[in-house]
Image: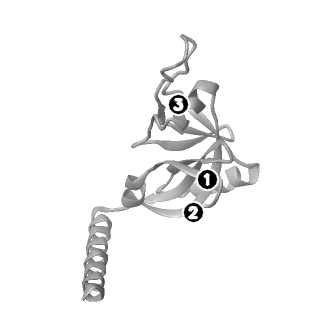
Amino acid sequence: MAEGKKLIAENRKARFNYFVEDTYECGIALVGTEVKSVKGGNISFPDAFAEIINGEVYLKNFHISEYSFSSIFNHNPDRPKKLLLHKEEIKRLIRKVEEKGYTLIPLDFYLKNGRVKTTLGVCKGKKMFDKRETIKNRDIDRDTQREIASKLRG
């Protein structure tokens, strides 16, 4: 990653279950205890997705655990989080999502210059045979890397 970025979490399942057509960098509107909890890595998003409501993009099923050192005034862990994008980007996303089969999936979460950001992917779901092909290609790549390494060692 580039300088000034620190990866918090990555959604590896998303790249396995979806074809990623396009990506957007988004900020996330969070409250104070949410930011502290995210910086601590207390997040869970296996089935998270983004939804466009009234021209605004919201992240759903994104769980940020409560901050343990907070008082009783802690945040709601499962509230929808607003994603910060430009209007032109939102219009492009609306046009893409209206096409059949496209959805918005968060691919990773990171800190950039002290701010929490996410990479939002415009994704299309893979069929079972596509997933099998992905596994096959990964195994072939792993075998060729092993062969190259063994040839280099002697």
Could you say whether the residue bearing mark 3 is in a helix, strand or loop? Answer: helix
Give the amino acid at mark 3: Ser
Residue at far top of view: 72
151 left or right, relative to 18: left
Residue at far front of view: 154
Quadrant of the image occupied by residue 142: bottom left
Q: How is the image coloured?
A: one colour
Alpha carbon separation for disc pair 3 and 2: 29 Å
Give the amino acid at mark 1: Lys
Q: Which residue is mark 2?
A: 22
Q: Residue at x 51, y 51 (%)?
A: 108
- Counting residues from the start of the chain, the first of labels 3 and 2 encountered is 2
User: Which one is in front in this view, the residue at disc 3 or the one at disc 2?
Assistant: 3
Q: Which residue is mark 1?
A: 5
Residue 59 screen position, x and y as percent: 55, 39
| Label annotation for residue 37 | 3
